[in-house]
Image: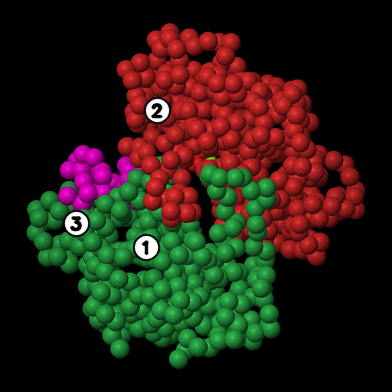
């Protein structure tokens, strides 16, 4: 279905998003929360990259900085040929329709005083000079696409179920025919029985409209279901970026390994045989990350070098990028190999 | 009529109704179950199916009004909680039954140190001196894996991470050596790695203390990993109940079956498409006169619209002992037998 040679629609290079910390009565700049600290990846057109990792590791910040909902501190974000991180305001306004976001909490992201029609056509008001009728026609078309009954067009958000509200959010994101959508935990707030509806819808739309997704989630089973490739983040950096199939079969980074071993499989037989890696302690603060590897304070396989030298993300097997000294041949040389550090276009499933 | 002594808690025909301006909501409809000594009973079900309200009704933790426990009994070691005076019940809460609420941030008081909050029930219920309570509090924090416990005792909730706060909640619930621990979605808000720490802790505590535990969650993966027995709730009633392996291997209720099929797996073949449960959960505006799952059920037939199916054993064992299900499709001819 997808050819491995397809060019990337999205290329992120060394993206950084630091939030300044001000303290004292003079609001002195005393440090930075390094929420995203040098992240690089590509996404092939029409594919899904999963972004996983523990709460606070910087997943949402990556998505927001990519769409310029934040002003990135450094790095390039090339989406369909334009470096979004550097676009001037007017050019950015014209770019906006092509890149959209679906948010975690369908309740909070919809204005309770607006009807479904108002909500879905809001981006059309902003970016088109269409007549009322033409906009309404588009709203109906979108409602059909996401499976909302046309009779609901004048209802308010509270009159919908969680799954339906998430469909409204998706319809709005689709209004301007985007090519790239950041889905930030789009199913986390939904009941299990409703999650599958929304995931199937996202897949159908991808197939029909050729959409490219960054799918942010802490649900590793769902990411396996949806994504061709998966980036595992830890404390602002990517620990491993691998084709989904390889990652789930044999994670390489010790953090990826621990994370996957902690997932609870809904199968009592398997659960009894499972070998869990229980990580000790808590995630360090992104305002004060450890020297060396970010994961060194909790890593079961930590070595001396890990406490001093930051490993860089490098291709250690075809299509698999890992930032870990276990896989760097000459542990000790700080630079890593720049040639390998660039994100490779991974093989697809 | 009493259960064998091995039952710590026995709930019979519990019925809880909310009286709201929009009318009544029948949140818990004749729920019966028991909990054995040392057992971990998992409770799963749709959001709004009555899991929390059932457990909170037992300890009178609901706002009354609008809540009203309209019937039923709940024997804790033979004494009925439902008919107890408020004062008697206060001595049960915290001392005999520990409750871990879903959101640790809202249930820990931000203006008191953690030590204060752990020691309070010890001084109140166990009549300990301050020094004794302090020693016990340190012991409890160590038990739940909080390093440097003595210093941590004098810190405030905001100084702890989410996972640590959740462990502190468990420490508080365990403070007075309760016979029963009720944990309502205790790990839902946590990351999988922190969740794994907590689940490991619970396994250890069961071995060490032999406590009986009720664990509410929507995460079937968690249930598969820690429960001995599972109750599935839908529409304010128990629709299926079985030992954990039996339930996962041989689910009977169409809701349980569908639920197990909607979740993708982390290993094995990747499903091309996820199965969905179409439709909405029922609005519980009155007593159930038909099957609450019928509108979403692929096996619906006439009887389902006319009669709410009773729970019925599928293995000939007494109700609650083996595997039972409330479904006409499963037993169309003998739906009423279980009332006998
Ligand atoms: N506007 C902001 N100002 C300061 N710090 C921020 C801001 N936004 C996020 N952070 C911090 O950056 C880090 C990453 O946050 P982010 O929301 O990206 O995490 P996440 O991986 O999406 O977590 P979750 O899974 O909980 O949604 C956190 O430590 C957070 O506290
Ligand atoms: N204070 C209240 N007033 C009115 N109705 C209530 C109140 N609390 C709960 N309910 C209703 O009681 C029913 C059962 O709620 P309950 O909280 O027990 O569900 P649950 O199974 O725990 O769901 P969840 O998985 O979302 O926690 C729901 O229909 C809910 O709307
Ligand atoms: Mg987030
Ligand atoms: Mg609940």
CA separation in Å, label 2 and label 1: 35 Å
**Callout 3 and callout 2 share a chain:** no
The residue that label 1 is drawn on is B228
Residue B100, quarter of the rendered image: bottom left
With B8 as the anchor, is A64 left or right in this view?
Answer: right
Residue tagged by mark 2?
A: A295
Q: Colour of chain B?
A: green
For this view, does B143 lie left or right of residue A12?
Answer: left
Q: Position of residue A344 (x, y in %)?
A: 63, 20
Label 1: how many residues lie within 10 Å, few (<14), some (14-19) or many (20+)? Answer: some
Q: How many marks?
A: 3
Region of the chain picked out in magenta, as a range? B139-166
Q: Quadrant of the image for the C terminus of chain B?
A: bottom left
Residue at 67% from the left image edge and 47% from the top image edge: B272
Q: Quadrant of residue A291?
A: top left
Q: Is residue B72 above or below residue A175?
A: below
Residue under disc 2 on the same chain as residue under disc 1: no
The N terminus of chain B is located in which quarter? bottom left
Q: In this view, does B14 lie above or below A124?
A: below
**Which residue is disc 3 drawn over?**
B119
Q: Which of B113 and A63 is in front in this view?
A: A63
The verdict on residue B251 being magenta is: no
From the top left corner, tell me how far across and down residue B191 is, in percent. Answer: 44, 44
Q: Residue furthest bottom?
A: B340
Chain of the residue under the numbered disc 2 shown in the image: A
Secondary structure beneath dot 3 equals helix
**Chain letter of the residue beneath label 1 in the structure image:** B
């Amino acid at each position: 279905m997808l050819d491995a040679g397809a060019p990337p629609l999205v290329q992120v290079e060394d993206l950084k998003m630091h939030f300044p910390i001000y303290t004292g009565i003079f609001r002195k700049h005393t440090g930075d929360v390094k929420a995203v600290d040098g992240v690089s990846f590509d996404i092939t057109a029409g594919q899904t990259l999963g972004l996983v990792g523990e709460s606070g590791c910087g997943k949402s910040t990556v998505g927001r900085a990519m769409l310029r909902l934040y002003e990135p501190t450094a790095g390039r974000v090339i989406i369909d040929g334009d470096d979004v991180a550097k676009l001037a305001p007017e050019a950015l306004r014209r770019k906006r329709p092509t890149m959209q976001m679906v948010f975690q909490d369908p309740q909070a992201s919809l204005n309770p005083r607006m009807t479904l029609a108002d909500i879905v056509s809001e981006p059309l008001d902003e970016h088109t000079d269409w007549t009322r009728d033409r906009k309404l026609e588009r709203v109906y078309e979108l409602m059909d696409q996401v499976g909302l009954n046309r009779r609901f067009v004048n209802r308010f958000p509270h009159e919908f179920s969680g799954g339906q509200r998430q469909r409204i959010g998706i319809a709005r994101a689709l209004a301007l025919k985007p090519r790239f959508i950041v889905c930030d935990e789009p199913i986390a707030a939904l009941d299990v029985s409703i999650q599958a509806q929304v995931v199937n819808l996202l897949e159908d739309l991808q197939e029909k409209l050729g959409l490219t997704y960054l799918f942010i989630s802490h649900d590793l089973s769902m990411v396996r279901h949806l994504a061709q490739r998966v980036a595992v983040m830890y404390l602002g950096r990517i620990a491993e970026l691998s084709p989904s199939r390889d990652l789930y079969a044999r994670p390489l980074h010790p953090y990826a390994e621990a994370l996957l071993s902690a997932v609870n499989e809904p199968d009592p037989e398997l659960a009894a045989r499972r070998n869990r890696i229980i990580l000790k302690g808590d995630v360090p603060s992104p305002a004060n990350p450890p020297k060396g590897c970010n994961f060194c304070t909790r890593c079961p396989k930590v070595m001396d070098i890990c406490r001093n030298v930051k490993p860089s993300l490098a291709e250690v097997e075809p299509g698999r990028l890992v930032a870990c000294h276990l896989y760097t041949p000459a542990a000790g040389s700080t630079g890593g190999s720049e040639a390998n550090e660039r994100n490779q276009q991974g093989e697809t499933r | 009529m009493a259960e064998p002594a091995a039952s710590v808690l026995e709930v019979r025909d519990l019925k809880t109704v909310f009286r709201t301006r929009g009318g009544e909501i029948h949140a818990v409809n004749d729920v019966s179950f028991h909990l054995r000594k040392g057992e971990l009973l998992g409770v799963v079900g749709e959001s709004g199916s009555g899991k929390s309200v059932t457990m909170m009704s037992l300890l009178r933790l609901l706002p009354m009004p609008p809540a009203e426990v309209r019937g039923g009994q709940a024997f804790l070691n033979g004494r009925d909680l439902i008919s107890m005076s408020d004062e008697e019940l206060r001595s049960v809460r915290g001392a005999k039954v520990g409750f871990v609420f879903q959101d640790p941030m809202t249930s820990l008081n931000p203006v008191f140190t953690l030590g204060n909050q752990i020691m309070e029930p010890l001084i109140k219920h166990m009549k300990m001196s301050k020094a004794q309570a302090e020693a016990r509090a340190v012991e409890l924090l160590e038990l739940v894996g909080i390093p440097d416990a003595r210093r941590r005792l004098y810190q405030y909730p905001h100084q702890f991470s989410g996972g640590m706060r959740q462990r502190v909640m468990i420490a508080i619930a365990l403070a007075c050596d309760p016979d029963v621990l009720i944990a309502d979605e205790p790990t839902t808000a946590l990351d999988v790695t922190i969740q794994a720490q907590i689940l490991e802790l619970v396994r250890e505590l069961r071995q060490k203390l032999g406590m009986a535990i009720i664990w509410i969650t929507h995460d079937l993966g968690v249930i598969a990993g820690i429960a001995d027995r599972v109750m599935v709730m839908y529409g304010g009633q128990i629709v299926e109940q079985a030992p954990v392996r039996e339930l996962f291997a041989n689910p009977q209720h169409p809701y349980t079956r569908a639920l197990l099929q909607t979740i993708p797996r982390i290993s094995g073949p990747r499903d091309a498409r996820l199965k969905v449960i179409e439709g909405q959960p029922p609005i519980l505006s009155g007593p159930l006169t038909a099957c609450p799952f019928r509108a979403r059920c692929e096996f619906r037939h006439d009887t389902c619209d006319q009669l709410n199916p009773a729970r019925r054993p599928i293995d000939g064992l007494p109700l609650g002992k083996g595997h039972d299900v409330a479904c006409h499709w499963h037993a169309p001819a003998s739906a009423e037998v279980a009332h006998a």
